[in-house]
Structure formats: C-alpha cells, structure tokens
Image (cartoon, rainbow, N blue to C red):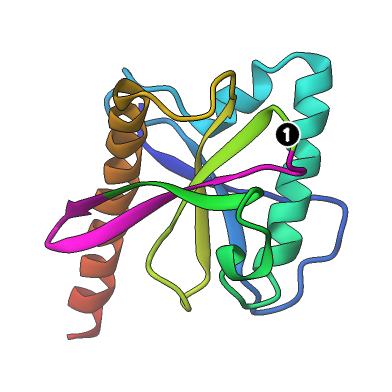
Amino acid sequence: MALKLIPYKNKLPQPVDSRWVYLMSGDGVGQFEHAWKDLNEQTKENKRGAYLALDKLKNGWITGQLLEEIFDRKICHDVHTFSHLLKPWTIYSFKKTKKDVIRLYFIYGPPPPNGMLIVIKIDTKDQQKLTSHQKENLEKLAKLVINLQSKENEKLINSTE
C-alpha cells in the first residue's frame, strides 16, 4: 500500500491559494493505522464529531495562522516532539471542544508557511496523557509523511536544475 495524502474537503468553499488540510491514507508498509481509515471506523456519533473537528481545524488553518496560536491550549496543543532528518518535528492534538473525546493528531509539513497540515491519526482519547507506545506510533506515522514530503521536495529540486 502506498502512502497517500487525501485533501479534506467540506461543504465550505476553499479559497484559492489557501492552505490545505490532508488526511493520511495508506502508510507505505501496510502495518500502521492511518487517519482516513480511523475516520471511517468511528461510530456514527464519533464520526460526526470527527467531521466537525476537521471543519474547525480547516477553518482555523485557512486563516494563515498556526493553530496553536488561534485556539486555546486545551483545544490545540503539542503532544510529542522528536528529531528526524536533522530537524525537530512536533505532533499536535486538536479537538472540537475542551470536553470532546475525538482527537485529531497532526503535523505541519512541509513547515509553514507552505500551507500543508497533515492529519496522521483520528482517535478517541480515554486518558489525559498519551502512553509512550501511543507516542511511538504517532512518531512512526509522522516520519512516514515527512519522508514522503522529503522525496517530493527532492523531485521538485531535481526537476528545476
């Protein structure tokens, strides 16, 4: 299965040249979960909550600001930082409201202001903090996306030479 990034489209118009929200679909190795699958496997109630959270995430993202600057820390905050390809990367958690059980885990990639935000996992959250195993899984998913983006950037650089 190849890693794909699916643009999230809701009923609201997407401004021309605006930032996009992508859902991770596929993983390149067939052993990790991904956001598109997570979304489709939610209960009816949680799926509705996930779509509402995605709408709120997209509406904040197209403003041109970083989400952690727009939203309260209880709605959008960092959950894990790691180093990959000699750069620091951060995984963020986002939810529609402070009491919502659906969490969207995302990374910025390539780093802003280029305009991509990639949702790597959609999950329900039972406890306050992520376990080290959950953080490791999120990091693996993020690295898959980062590696894909690095390869795409290399293609762009090589094609312009």
Q: Main secondary structure of the magenta part?
A: strand
On the rendered structure, is 79 left or right of 58? left
Residue 115 in the image: above or below residue 106: below
Task: Using a 10 Å C-alpha cutoff, classify the residue at mark 1 as few (fewer than 14 neighbours), some (14 to 19) or many (20 or more).
Answer: many
Q: Quadrant of residue 139?
A: top left
Q: Quadrant of the C terminus?
A: bottom left
Q: Position of residue 45 (x, y in %)?
A: 83, 20
| Numbered circles on residues, count | 1
Q: Position of residue 51 (x, y in %)?
A: 77, 38
Q: Position of residue 115 (x, y in %)?
A: 52, 71
The secondary element bearing badge 1 is classed as helix
Q: Residue at x 77, y 67 (%)?
A: 14
Give yes or no for residue 9 being in the magenta stretch: no
Q: Position of residue 31 (x, y in %)?
A: 31, 18
Pick whichever, 129 or 40, lies toward us: 129
Dot 1 amino acid type: Ala
Q: Residue at x 34, y 43 (%)?
A: 142
Residue 31 in the image: above or below residue 120: above
Q: Quadrant of residue 97?
A: top right
Q: Residue at x 69, y 54 (%)?
A: 57
Q: Quadrant of the N terminus?
A: top left
On the rendered structure, is 3 left or right of 62? left
Pick whichever, 31 or 81, lies toward us: 81
Give yes or no for residue 95 being in the magenta stretch: yes
On the rendered structure, is 7 left or right of 136? right
Q: Which residue is mark 1?
A: 50
Q: Which residues are magenta?
A: 82-98
Pick whichever, 81 or 42, lies toward us: 81
Residue 137 in the image: above or below residue 150: above
Q: Residue furthest bottom?
A: 161
